Amino acid sequence: MYDTLFQSDYPLTDEHIAFFREHGYVRCDDVLTDEELEIIRKGVDQERAERKGIARDLAGSGDDDQHQAEHDRILQMLNLWELYPEIKAYVFGGRIARMARQLSGSPTLHLYHDQALIKEPGPSAPSPWHQDQPYWPSREPGMFSCWMALDDVTVARGCMQFIPGSHQWGEFPPMSFKGDGPALRDYLSDEQKARWKPAPVELKAGSCTFHHGLTFHYAHANTTDHIRRALVTIYIPAGITYAAEEKMANPFVDSITSQKGQPLRGTRFPRLV
């Protein structure tokens, strides 16, 4: 049904690649067509309504929370490609994966997982400054993400913000999304704090950012009257090995087929390119 979509190449430039490698993130505008956007939104909205797969509120504090009864504050829905042909067509269509391969320089890429991240109007929450690498089961840095805007995103609606060059600062502890732990900035040296200059990236729907797993990033709460939907795909380049018990638990541990120190592979981590 979707065989002709998500196939064409995006005109990624040498400047895109150089910016990504220097700063740890890059912006790519007008990656999707209006038709492709509507197809992805269809799958995301269906899962938002039906909750067939893995879904959780990253900022939730329990059923006794007054806001929890009304809305998830940061709704995360994982591996939609396994449930919806619309999302599978996007993930496997080739365009985004080929962009990711160019940016990383890796000869191959496997999918770690996709995730829809939704911030409803009203009682949403900020996503704290954090790195993604501490949450992933890899020993080495190098995994990275594509964050695709399914709605226009501004600072007030929760666009991505980055600290340029922070992917070169090493790996820090995972941060709590519930606001009950130390802030990432507390772990920095004085020199790193002096380089703390957030770069907000507002996007039109159908545009995206790629960011390295060590890049510091943040998204404001959605304080507007409009929903903020994003679809993230996370990539495993060549050379990444399985950390096993060295890293925190992850929802895909039962599908991992690797032994500790072997290339990170699993029954749910298909090769994309």
Image (spheres, rainbow, N blue to C red):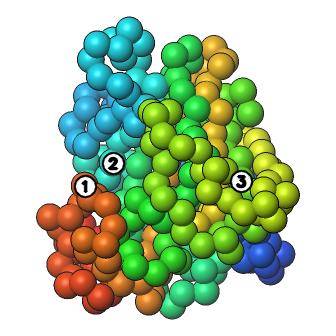
| Front residue (pair 84, 247) | 247
- The numbered mark, 1 or 2, whose residue comes first in the sequence reads 2
Q: Residues within 10 Å of mark 3 (few under 14, many from 20)?
A: many
- Seen at 24% across and 67% down, the residue is 268
- Cα separation between marks 2 and 3: 23 Å
Q: CB of mark 1 within 8 Å of CB of mark 3?
A: no
Q: Residue furthest left?
A: 254
**Image position, residue 89 (x, y; %):** 40, 58
**Image position, residue 259 (x, y; %):** 20, 84
The residue under label 3 is which amino acid type? Phe
Classify mark 1: helix, strand or loop.
Answer: loop
Q: Residues within 10 Å of mark 2 (few under 14, many from 20)?
A: many
Classify mark 3: helix, strand or loop.
Answer: strand
Would you name the residue on which mark 2 appears? 78
Q: Quadrant of residue 131?
A: bottom right
Compared with residue 114, is residue 224 higher up or lower down, i.e. above or below?
above
- Seen at 77% across and 45% down, the residue is 200
Q: CB of mark 1 within 8 Å of CB of mark 2?
A: yes
Tag count = 3
- The numbered mark, 1 or 3, whose residue comes first in the sequence reads 3
Would you name the residue on which mark 3 appears? 162
Residue 241 tag number: none
Classify mark 2: helix, strand or loop.
Answer: strand
- Cα separation between marks 1 and 3: 26 Å
- Seen at 41% across and 49% down, the residue is 115
